Image: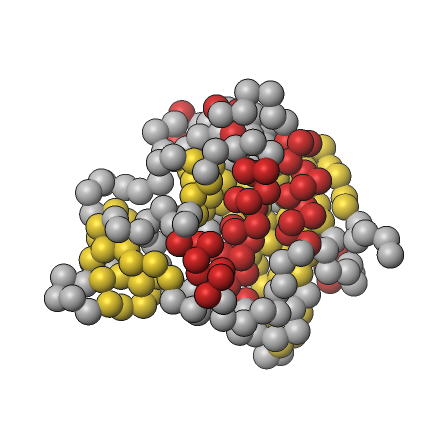
């Protein structure tokens, strides 16, 4: 069986936008778009994502048939990408709920999943992945971001493309709640665990629920589950 198509582009506004167009035209699950440079890359909550030459800017198409696992897709992608980077020689890659890859205390990459619906059913999901590899970090982000080249001096985006894409294509977008094994794997990479938070709830980060919610232990001792929101650490003016 032939692999799904991979479209390689030199420069594009957003690989996600290109792949949405291909999906509308009938592209199969696993189809992917990668670009050397994005001029209009985006992150979560509408933020711009700097995507100069030297990084891995990749989008992959999923065609889920059920709804429950959609909110867990970015977490599952984070798990397989972190593992793929380590197999290439990166040191321990952390995961910051809900969609960030961390190297030490700095952001290495991010994941953004966008669904398109056909009535009440998912038509498709495009998962965008951005990993800083050998690209320069924008001056305003130098204190909170890093690149893979800081620990793997000779690595290139092409070194990542094949193993990372293969790992992404193995993710089951129809899977339901996180399994105990997945939660254990996430716990070993949980960058937030034990850190005091100001938001999305005031308390201490305490892991994930099976539904992928962030568990926060409140001052009174109870634990609340937060499904969405911006993470702010209590001991810093802003978090990575």
Q: Is residue 68 visible?
A: yes
Q: How many marks?
A: 0
The residue at 77%/60% (across/down) is 28
Hey, which residue is sitting farthest bottom in the picture?
120
Furthest residue in direction left, as rendered: 220
- Residue 154 shown left or right of residue 5 in the figure: left
Image quadrant occupied by the C terminus: top left
Q: Is residue 87 left or right of residue 222?
A: right
* Rendering coords of residue 144 (x, y %): 36, 34
- Measured as percent of width and height from the top left, residue 202 is found at 20, 58
- Residue at the (52%, 44%) spot, across then down: 82
The percent coordinates of residue 32 (x first, y second) are: 71, 49
Is 206 placed above or below 239 here?
below
Q: Is residue 52 visible?
A: no
Check the image and name the residue furthest to the top: 153
Which quadrant would residue 125 be assigned to in this image? bottom right
Extreme residue toward the right, this view: 1
The residue drawn where x is 22% and y is 40% is: 236
Q: Please state which of residues 77 and 116 is positioned toward the viewer in this rendering.
A: 77
The N terminus, quarter of image:
bottom right
Tell me the quarter of the picture where residue 127 sits: bottom right
Q: Position of residue 148 (x, y in %)?
A: 52, 29
- Tell me what residue is drawn at x 44 percent, y 54 percent: 186
């Amino acid at each position: 069986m032939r692999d799904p198509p991979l479209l390689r582009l030199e420069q594009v506004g957003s690989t996600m936008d290109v792949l949405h167009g291909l999906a509308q035209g009938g592209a199969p699950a696993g189809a992917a778009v990668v670009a050397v440079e994005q001029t209009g890359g985006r992150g979560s909550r509408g933020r711009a994502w700097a995507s100069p030459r030297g990084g891995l800017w990749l989008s992959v198409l999923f065609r889920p048939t059920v709804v429950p696992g959609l909110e867990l897709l970015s977490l599952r992608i984070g798990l397989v990408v972190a593992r793929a980077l380590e197999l290439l020689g990166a040191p321990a890659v952390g995961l910051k709920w809900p969609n960030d890859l961390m190297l030490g205390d700095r952001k290495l990459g991010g994941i953004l999943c966008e669904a398109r619906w056909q009535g009440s059913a998912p038509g498709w999901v495009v998962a965008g992945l951005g990993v800083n590899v050998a690209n320069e970090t924008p001056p305003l982000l130098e204190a909170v971001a890093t690149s893979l080249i800081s620990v793997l001096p000779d690595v290139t985006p092409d070194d990542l493309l094949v193993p990372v894409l293969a790992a992404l294509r193995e993710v089951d977008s129809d899977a339901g709640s996180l399994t105990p094994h997945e939660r254990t794997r996430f716990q070993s990479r949980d960058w937030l665990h034990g850190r005091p938070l100001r938001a999305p709830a005031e308390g201490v980060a305490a892991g994930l629920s099976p539904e992928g919610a962030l568990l926060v232990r409140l001052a009174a001792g109870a634990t609340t589950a937060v499904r969405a929101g911006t993470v702010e650490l209590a001991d810093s003016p802003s978090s990575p």
